[in-house]
Structure formats: structure tokens, C-alpha cells
Image (cartoon, grey):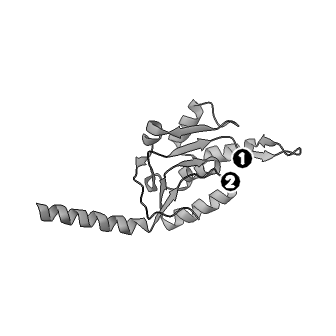
Amino acid sequence: MKFMTGLLTAVLLLAGVAASHATVRIGEDRGGRIGTYVDKYQDMRSSGETVIIDGLCASACTIVLGAIPHDKICVTAHASLGFHAAWDFGDDGRAITNPEATQMLYSMYPSQVKRWIVSRGGLTPHMIFLRGKELASMYRPCYMDARAQSPR
């Protein structure tokens, strides 16, 4: 029995090492330009990388939910997703909501995330956060892998 336990442990460790080369960790990402994130996540999707969300993923960062296959995303207990309406700078330099970009952003999300957003009043200029048990009910748990890379 001791031999089998040791063998199983070795197999699991080797599987973890192989998987770590294709793992990206997202944490403390406050977002940015939508197009930049669409491009970045398309590259990740093409490479088949797994994404660990382990901290804040807000604004355009949340595009990951629609760009990466559901089975390639996991969340830790520290994961927190922040959603709000898309915005541009107006002529006076102030932020103004961009309805078309907001609709495009919303359309990228999986249905369970869309339902959650709608249940909280939709995408508005105010940030809403999906975390804890609600997030864990939508995505599989993962555990931080020290070898995971931060996104490029």
C-alpha cells in the first residue's frame, strides 16, 4: 500500500509539473483597454493555457471568462472579479459610459455570469464584485501553483 501511495504521489507531481508550463496566473489586474485584453486572451486560448484567477481581475480583465474555455479557468479563495460599464473620455476629459462597448463587453460573458450581473442591476459605472461562494459555484477551485506565470 505504501508503494502505491508513493507511486500515486509521483504521478500527481509529474502531472502538475507538466501542467505548470501552460498555466497563467491572474492576480491584481485592474483592467485596461478592451482590445488589448481581447488580443491577449485570444493568444492564451490558442495556446491552450490554463488560467488561475488568484486575486483581483477587474474591468477588461474579466473578458477572460468569455475568451478562455470554462474548463481552462479555475479560481482560488482569493479570486475577485470586478465588473462595470465600459467608458471613454468625453470632450471635457471626464469618463462617460460607452453603451456600445458595454454591450460588447457584456456579450462576451458566459450565461451564468450574465445572469449574476443582471441580478445586480447590470453593468453600470459602479463596480460590482463576484467572489467567494458565488464565484466558486461557477468555476472550479484551484490551488496556487508557484510556477504559474503572470500574464504577458
Q: How many neighbours does mark 2 have within 10 angstroms: few (below 14), some (14-19), or many (20 or more)?
A: some
Q: Amino acid at mark 1?
A: Ala
Disc 1 or disc 2, which is closer to the eye?
2
Q: How many neighbours does mark 1 have within 10 angstroms: few (below 14), some (14-19), or many (20 or more)?
A: some
Residue at left offset 19%, top offset 66%: 7
In which image quadrant can residue 81 be found? Answer: top right
For label 1, the SS is: helix
Q: Amino acid at mark 2?
A: Ile
In the rendering, which numbered label is found on residue 133? none
As displayed, is residue 126 above or below residue 14?
A: above
The residue singled out by tag 1 in the image is: 101
Residue at left offset 40%, top offset 48%: 140
Number of marks in the rendered image: 2
As displayed, is residue 40 above or below residue 28?
A: below
For label 2, the SS is: helix
Residue at left offset 63%, top offset 58%: 38
Q: Quadrant of the C terminus?
A: bottom right
- Give the image location of residue 86, x and y in percent: 71, 44
92 or 117: which is nearer to us?
92
| Left or right of residue 19, residue 130 in this image | right
109 or 11: which is nearer to us?
11
- Give the image location of residue 97, x and y in percent: 76, 40
Residue contact between numbered discs 1 and 2, judged by CB atoms under 8 Å = yes
| Left or right of residue 38, residue 45 in this image | left
Residue at left offset 21%, top offset 63%: 8
- Give the image location of residue 121, x and y in percent: 62, 30
The residue singled out by tag 2 in the image is: 34
